[in-house]
Image (spheres, grey):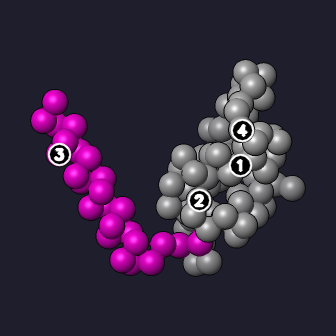
Amino acid sequence: MTLQENIRLILSKFPQARHSRGEFAWCYLQEFYDVSVGVFKEKFKEFFQSWAGVERAYREVLKEPEFKLSPEEEAKRYKKASEFKKEYAKT
């Protein structure tokens, strides 16, 4: 399977992974690296070596109509990012 096919599988099987990169990464680790509770160093290194390609493919797949966020969800995401930037600027 290609990266895009793997990502489509994850996003279809775990819809919550569309809204959180952390959740997506965890689901990806569970599905393709047989991780269930904790991550072994070797498995994490193997996963991390391919992460840049997975991240690029993830962004591309999220642009497809089937996986695109609704306008309301998109607005919430931008609002949360804006709030984080304001909080970060205060420190």
Reading the image, the residue beneath label 4 is 37
Residue 13's disc number: none
Image position, residue 9 (x, y; %): 76, 64
Q: Say what amino acid the circle numbered 4 marks.
A: Val
Instruction: Tell me if label 3 and label 1 are in contact, CB under 8 Å.
Output: no
Marks 1/4: CA–CA distance:
13 Å
Picture quadrant of residue 34:
top right
Marks 2/4: CA–CA distance:
18 Å
Query: How dense is the environment of label 1, judged by Cα within 10 Å: few (below 14), some, or many (20 and up)?
Result: many
Q: Say what amino acid the circle numbered 1 marks.
A: Tyr
Q: Does the magenta segment cover residue 4?
A: no
Secondary structure of the residue carrying tag 1 is: helix
Instruction: Tell me if label 2 and label 1 are in contact, CB under 8 Å.
Output: yes
Marks 3/1: CA–CA distance:
31 Å
Q: Residue shown at 81%/54% (left/top)? A: 2
Q: Of label 3 and label 1, which has the lower sequence position?
A: 1
Image position, residue 10 (x, y; %): 71, 60
On the picture, is 71 further left or further right than 44? left
Q: In this view, does 72 lie above or below 50?
A: below
Q: Give the camera-side residue of 46 and 39.
A: 39
Q: Of label 2 and label 4, which has the lower sequence position?
A: 2
Mark in the foreground, 4 or 3: 4
Secondary structure mainly formed by the magenta segment: helix
Residue 86's disc number: 3
Secondary structure of the residue carrying tag 2 is: helix
Q: Residue shown at 65%/38% (left/top)? A: 51
Q: In which quadrant is the C terminus drawn?
A: top left
Reading the image, the residue beneath label 2 is 17
- Residue range (magenta): 67-91
Reading the image, the residue beneath label 1 is 28
